[in-house]
Image (cartoon, rainbow, N blue to C red):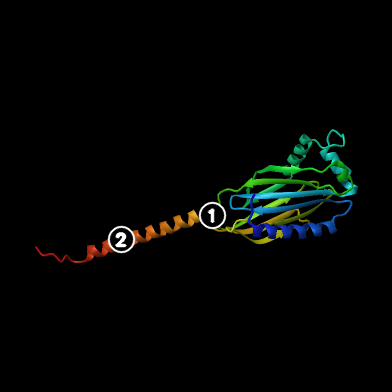
Amino acid sequence: MRRSPRSSGIAALALVLTTAGSSFAHRRDEYLQATRLAIDPDRVQIELDLTPGIAVAESVLADVDLDRNRSISAGEADAYCARLLSAMVVDVDGRPLALALTSSAFPDVGAMMTGEGTMRLQAVAAMPRLSGGTHRLRYRNSHRSDIAVYLVNALVPASDRVAVAAQRRDVDQRDVTIEYTLRPDAATRIRGGVLVAVAGAVIWLAVWWRRRRREPSAWVP
């Protein structure tokens, strides 16, 4: 998950602006779910922050703290993350991607009850092998849609092979389609150049041979 200093700085700025904007919009009776998507040539990474307001914190806690002991165990956290991932849909060019959890962090119950506790998780999905050109990544989050408000944004790509062209969100920001351009890697460009050169040489030899066959022989017996 390494990123260049420039990309990390821009991504951090985008995150600050998103977080600042979301703090103004976050109300006591809402479950704020802020998603950031990082597209790489071979995978997409998802960072999700979930912050329940005071009025809905008890309801959210009941979903996590299944034994009702006012404490979130590792097993309960893992089970909640699994339910979260099952409520997400990710595909590229219409081809579904399988999400896998890579990390998670849960606040203490006291912070959650005051509306200041944020649950954070990171997940990743491997991309199929894609050709160079334009592609579309779609992400949808339907977790706790009864109380949730959603924010979603694409981060600045870490790879110079990826360029985000457009983001189209629905009105609730629970669904986004990201159009991006994927440039061929160096090996593909080299292979392409070699193939073009070989093809050109074959054509030249074919033309030369046909011309030789048509020319009268200069040798007289």
- Looking at the picture, tell me which residue is in the foreground, 67 or 16: 16
Q: Quadrant of residue 63?
A: top right
27 sits to left or right of 193:
right
Q: In the figure, 115 relative to 220: above or below?
A: above
Amino acid carrying label 1: it is Ser
- Looking at the picture, tell me which residue is in the foreground, 69 or 137: 69
- Looking at the picture, tell me which residue is in the foreground, 162 or 134: 162
Q: Earlier in the sequence, mark 2 or mark 1?
A: 1
Q: In the figure, 86 relative to 214: above or below?
A: above
Q: Quadrant of residue 72?
A: top right
User: Taking the image as drawn, is residue 201 in sight?
Assistant: yes
Q: In the figure, 101 relative to 164: above or below?
A: above
2 sits to left or right of 152:
left
Q: Position of residue 165 (x, y in %)?
A: 64, 62
Q: Which mark is residue 131?
A: 1
Q: Are marks 2 and 1 in contact (CB under 8 Å)?
A: no
**Which residue does the numbered mark 2 point to in the structure image?**
205
User: Residue at image x 87%, y 54%?
Assistant: 27
